[in-house]
């Protein structure tokens, strides 16, 4: 068993807690955008979209926390979370280094580590049954 498989509950709890911090975008969308990207969007549609983005990211965090205690759902939760994080990474990097000097750069680094750990766990599942 790998170190990741042995500690997956704690990895998921930490990843979930960190991911849930994006509730900030639902509460203070303009401040979250400025902190994350160094820029803001204006208008009522921007408010709706950014708040929804914050809620959706927070739900991924909640799923990770739930999956930490429910081994049967871990493969689905980790797959969805990894896919979401990969999409964010690709979208930000598709704009070059423009946003890397802000919190988006930190998020990309942390999300990349999370995706790597999730992938190791999921790859390990092919060889071993689920563990708690």
Image: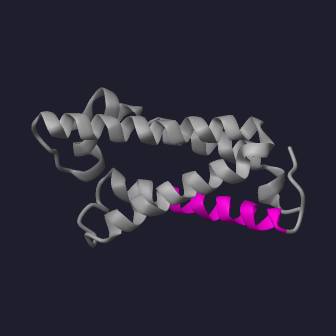
The N terminus is located in which quarter? bottom right
Q: Is residue 84 above or below residue 33?
A: below
Residue lying at 89% horizontally and 62% vertically, measured from the top left: 128
Looking at the image, how many numbered discs can be counted on the residues?
0
Is 117 contained in the magenta span?
yes
* Residue 22 shows in this picture: no
Residue lying at 76% horizontally and 35% vertically, measured from the top left: 69
Tell me residue 131's x, y (percent).
Answer: 87, 49
**Front-most of residues 49 and 68:** 49
Left or right: residue 36 versus residue 2 is left
Tell me residue 7's x, y (percent).
Answer: 79, 49
> What span is colored magenta in the figure?
110-126
Tell me residue 127's x, y (percent).
Answer: 87, 68
Question: Residue placed farthest to the top in the image?
Answer: 27
Magenta stretch, overall SS: helix
Left or right: residue 61 versus residue 42 is right
Tell me residue 62's x, y (percent).
Answer: 57, 35
Q: How is the image coloured?
A: one colour
Query: Splitting the image into 4 quarters, where does residue 79 fall?
Result: bottom right
Residue lying at 37% horizontally and 59% vertically, measured from the top left: 105
């Amino acid at each position: 068993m790998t170190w990741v498989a042995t500690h997956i509950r704690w990895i998921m709890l930490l990843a979930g807690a960190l991911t849930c911090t994006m509730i900030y975008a639902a509460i203070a969308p303009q401040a979250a955008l400025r902190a994350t990207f160094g820029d803001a969007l204006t208008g009522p549609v921007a408010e709706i979209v950014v708040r929804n983005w914050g809620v959706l990211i927070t739900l991924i965090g909640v799923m990770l926390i739930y999956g930490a205690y429910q081994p049967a759902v871990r493969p689905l939760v980790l797959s969805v979370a990894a896919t979401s994080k990969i999409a964010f990474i690709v979208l930000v990097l598709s704009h070059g280094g423009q946003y890397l000097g802000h919190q988006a750069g930190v998020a990309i680094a942390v999300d990349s580590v999370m995706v790597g750990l999730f992938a190791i766990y999921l790859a390990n599942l092919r060889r071993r049954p689920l563990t708690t």
